[in-house]
Image (cartoon, helix red, strand yellow):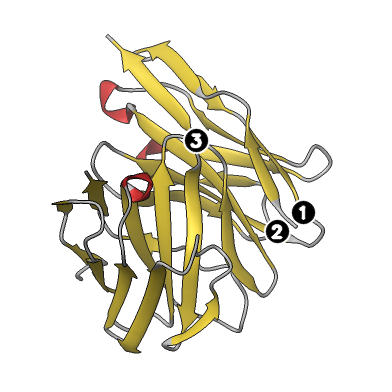
Amino acid sequence: DAGVIQSPRHEVTEMGQEVTLRCKPISGHDYLFWYRQTMMRGLELLIYFNNNVPIDDSGMPEDRFSAKMPNASFSTLKIQPSEPRDSAVYFCASSPGQGGFSNQPQHFGDGTRLSIL
Amino acid sequence: AQSVTQLDSQVPVFEEAPVELRCNYSSSVSVYLFWYVQYPNQGLQLLLKYLSGSTLVKGINGFEAEFNKSQTSFHLRKPSVHISDTAEYFCAVSGGSNYKLTFGKGTLLTVNP
């Protein structure tokens, strides 16, 4: 059973460039989450989707960040333009929905380590 | 609103010693509680979860946790640790129909020979 798949695993780019992170959730999972992990702030939820619809994007830091989920098996997180302070590990996670309650664990991908120079 | 406090940022122990990683939470609704483990350069893996019922929950790799509602705690324990348990451990809480997981800052467990 394949887990959550993220690509790329590592990304190094220069400030001002567009960055696109990709995620394939576990098949059949209704919920998809994007997190950012830094030493200073720990794990932060950026946005989550239910059945491909964004439900809560209150964690998205600013307009430079955008996320889409065009279908049940694919999501992207885009940063444009990128800045050095965006350097972090970005995780995607998915979870099955069950009765509308949050008692199902989230399954995480291995993350994308992003460095903005 | 929910919050999670992991009381120790780092816990060094010797191999085969017992360990307890502490977690306190606050929430205005009934909660679901989770412990995740993160090995270097990997994502988070679920260790165990408390949803309801027995307050003592057993997870993978010999870990267990006890839910204490009166003390709003969910401490993680293992009676004898191995070198391979060296990792960062995260306590997390969610509640009701809110699918957001609120994570603690993490506890780095280092097991020394």
- In the rendered structure, the answer to whether residue A67 lies left or right of residue A46 reads left
Q: Three-letter amino acid code at disc 2? A: Val
Q: Residue at position x 31%, y 49% from top?
A: A89
Residue A104 position within the rendered picture, expressed as x and y whole percent measured from the top left: 51, 68
Q: What is the crowding at mark 1: few (fewer than 14 residues within 10 Å), some, or many (at least 20)? A: some
Q: Chain of mark 3?
A: B
- In the rendered structure, the answer to whether residue B95 lies left or right of residue A55 reads right
Q: Residue at position x 50%, y 53% from top?
A: A44
Q: Secondary structure at mark 2?
A: strand
- Sooner in the amino-acid sequence: mark 3 or mark 1: 1
**Front: mark 2 or 3:** 3
Q: Give the residue pinned by disc 1.
A: B27
- In the rendered structure, the answer to whether residue A103 lies left or right of residue B59 reads right
Q: Give the residue pinned by disc 3.
A: B106
Would residue A51 be visible to someone looking at this image?
yes
Give the spatial CA distance, label 2 vs label 1: 7 Å
Q: Give the residue pinned by disc 2.
A: B31
Quadrant of the snapshot with the N terminus of chain A: bottom left
How many discs appear?
3
Q: Secondary structure at mark 1?
A: loop
Residue B47 position within the rendered picture, expressed as x and y whole percent measured from the top left: 43, 47
Give the quarter of the image for residue A77: bottom left
Q: What is the crowding at mark 2: few (fewer than 14 residues within 10 Å), some, or many (at least 20)? A: many
Give the spatial CA distance, label 3 vs label 1: 19 Å
Q: Are marks 2 and 1 on the same chain?
A: yes
Q: Three-letter amino acid code at disc 1? A: Ser
Residue A8 position within the rendered picture, expressed as x and y whole percent measured from the top left: 15, 60
Q: Are marks 3 and 1 on the same chain?
A: yes
Q: Three-letter amino acid code at disc 3? A: Gly
Q: Residue at position x 23%, y 46% from top?
A: A115
